[in-house]
Image: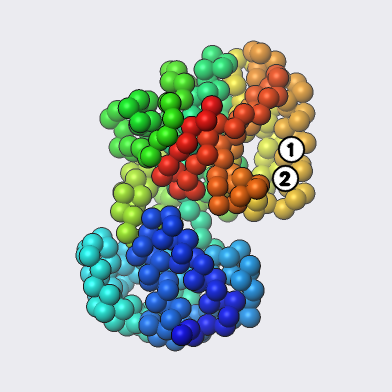
Amino acid sequence: MTMFPEDLDRGYRIQAAACRNLGSAFSGDLLERAADGALGDLRDLHRPWLEASTRKTFEDATPLRFLGALHHLTLTGAAPDLAAQYPAAKPDTDWPALIGAAKQAVVEHHDAIAAFMTSPPQTNEVRRSLCLVGGYLTLAAATGLPLRCLEIGASAGLNVNWDRYAYRFGEATWGDPASPVQIAGDWDGPPPPLPAATVAEREACDVAPVDITDEANALRLQAYVWPDQLDRLERLRAAIAMARQSGLHVEKADAAIWVAARLAPRDGVATVLVHSVMWQYMPAETQASILATLARAAAAATPSAPVAHLSMEPDPANMAQMQVRLTLWPGGEEKLLAEVHPHGASVRWLA
């Protein structure tokens, strides 16, 4: 049974399965119940997608917009009855009680949910730093130089602060042990190099950056964390607090223009262009422009002014599998460093 047209229904059920596969049974079950009609008639809230293809549903992350809207109501205190049934308050879900509260919230907060769903999800998964830090440390060990980090598609920029976090790679550790942000996961393989790495400069841009000094924006980021993954939520909150203290700024800019203005070798530092889970969302012409700028910078690189490209992006042959890759110039050899979980929950270190 479903209330949605076939393509939207399929999108909901595929997303529900994906949530379960990525460790959020609560999110998967809630989305499936929503598609079944248990939360009432949701078609008006989904009017922009009633005639959309399943592909369009996924491109717009429609089920995640609705899931985030409900979570947002609980985080802001707008729907206390619903919040009382969410995993933060009740780890063992009472589904009849939760469905009743969710149906009530959909009616009472229809306009707020609709408004929330007009904007696409924008997450800033802090544990992706566990995937990327091995690349930064490999670069620091290979060059012996401070790092100049340039990140595109940085969202709120929380992973720009990667060197201020504490990490565990199996039994090995790196970083400030007293950091409020502690990052660990299922680490398979030896640890990466563990040099004393220094960040000489950090800059970041995004086409629509999230200003986390604004509490409304910070709550919106938190709303897109799946409600039963409380460790992710606490890590995000700690990283937001650190970013506010450090005065981190993400510039609003087109990535190609921003990279063209900044990406060039600089003597005494290793300049690295960084991005994670964003490349496929850029237009082809933007990608081509960035790669052309990177090629010019690479051609000018020297041992005392190296240039690198560090990425965490889907495997072109398997979009469900993320890979961490590092290329360093002079030389230009690309290395596959790791295969990783999209949220950083697991890392298979290959280097």
Residue drawn at point x = 38 percent, y = 82 percent: 38
What whole-number distance in Å separates the C-alpha atoms at marks 2 and 1?
A: 6 Å
Residue drawn at point x = 64 percent, y = 74 percent: 53
Q: Where is mark 1, residue-wise?
A: 291
Q: Position of residue 154 (x, y in %)?
A: 54, 44
Residue drawn at point x = 50 percent, y = 72 percent: 12
Looking at the image, which is closer to me, 252 or 233?
233
**Callout 2 crowding tier (Cα within 10 Å): few <14, some 14–19, many ≥20:** some
Colouring mode (rainbow / by chain / secondary structure / one colour):
rainbow
Q: Position of residue 191 (x, y in %)?
A: 42, 26
216 left or right, relative to 207? left
Quick check: 9 above or below 346?
Answer: below
Amino acid residing under circle 1: Leu
For the question of whether residue 282 can be seen, the reply is yes
Looking at the image, which is closer to me, 262 or 190?
190
Q: Position of residue 204 (x, y in %)?
A: 56, 39
**Callout 1 crowding tier (Cα within 10 Å): few <14, some 14–19, many ≥20:** some
Amino acid residing under circle 2: Gln
Q: Secondary structure at mark 2?
A: helix
337 left or right, relative to 67? right
Quick check: 2 above or below 346?
Answer: below
Q: Within the image, what quadrant is residue 102 found in?
A: bottom left
| Residue 287 numbered tag | 2
For the question of whether residue 222 can be seen, the reply is no
Circles 2 and 1, Cβ within 8 Å, touching? The answer is yes
| Residue 241 numbered tag | none
Q: Secondary structure at mark 1?
A: helix
Q: Within the image, what quadrant is residue 79 found in?
A: bottom left
